[in-house]
Amino acid sequence: MARKEDISASVIRRLPRYYRFLGELLDRGQLRISSADLAAQMSLTASQIRQDLNCFGGFGQPGSGYNIPELHREIGHILGLDCRRRAVLIGAGNLGRAIAIHMNFPQYGMELRGIFDSDKSKTGLTVSGMKIMPVSLLEEFVRREKPETAILCIPKEGAEECAELLIRCGVMAFWNFSHCDLTAKHKGIIAENVHLGDSLMLLSYGLTNSDREF
Ligand code: NAI
């Protein structure tokens, strides 16, 4: 088992894919898989999977492969999905509403406790069973409810100020869609910056560099 600080970011970035893939196998009722099969189905090598999982203590038994429910549970535990961490969402526009409605937060170890927006015409409307609250109540709410995570779905312009308030009130993790860099200024926070455009640029790169004729 590697020390936490020695586990590379790329190994950690592969864990959600293992978790998702094993979950799909479980849904189909499969209980065991050999490392060779798992590797082939995930387009990885068996040695890469072994190396990745060995960082966390290894889970396979030589000759009998992986116990899927156990491995799925262990990876979920490593990812912290068996927690119930409080989250708050800021910005109930198109993106914020889609996230509130479509993300199954408990599945990711989170509980969405509040949704806030600065637009008076949106406050009081219900999204995903929750009333959108005015951003003027955000500070009081965060001090009372103590969410660890904030989901930022507001334009870049207001994001820095909003993040500062949240950090001052104890929020330490951001699922940040707001195209602003929070970690440069706020050392010690955890931020997962999502840029869907980056993914689209990679698709574009793939097309641009493909040998196929279209
Ligand atoms: P939208 O205009 O539908 O929603 C933005 C919402 O934020 C509005 O309801 C507005 O009233 C609210 N808002 C603005 N400033 C606020 C503040 N300081 N405090 C609380 N609420 C505030 O926009 P949409 O489509 O939902 O996108 C939201 C943001 O996410 C945009 O800035 C957009 O650029 C960004 N975005 C990022 C993506 C990514 O991959 N990271 C993908 C799509 C959008």
Image: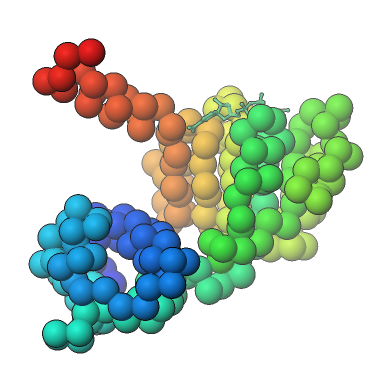
Going by the image, does 131 lie left or right of 92? Answer: right
Across and down, in percent, residue 181 comes to: 44, 36
Image quarter for ligand 1 equals top right
- Work out whether residue 139 or residue 53 is closer to the camera in this orientation and state it: 53
* Residue 32, quarter of the rendered image: bottom left
- Work out whether residue 52 or residue 121 is closer to the camera in this orientation and state it: 52
Q: Going by the picture, which residue comes out furthest to the top?
A: 214
Q: Residue at x 18, y 71 (%)?
A: 35
* Residue 161, quarter of the rendered image: top right
In this picture, is 187 found above or below 179? below
In this picture, is 68 found above or below 41? below
Across and down, in percent, residue 87 comes to: 64, 56
Task: State the quadrant of the N terminus.
Answer: bottom left
Q: Going by the picture, which residue comes out furthest to the front?
A: 29
Q: Residue at x 20, y 66 (%)?
A: 37
Across and down, in percent, residue 143 comes to: 73, 59
- Work out whether residue 136 or residue 209 is closer to the camera in this orientation and state it: 209
* Residue 111, quarter of the rendered image: bottom right
- Work out whether residue 93 or residue 17 is closer to the camera in this orientation and state it: 17
Residue 8 in view here:
no
Q: Residue at x 56, y 63 (%)?
A: 107
Q: Going by the picture, which residue comes out furthest to the right?
A: 124
Going by the image, does 69 lie left or right of 9? Answer: right
How many numbered marks appear?
0
Q: How is the image coloured?
A: rainbow
Task: State the quadrant of the C terminus.
Answer: top left
Residue 40 in view here:
yes
In this picture, is 120 found above or below 65? above
Going by the image, does 47 lie left or right of 162? Answer: left
Across and down, in percent, residue 42 comes to: 25, 56
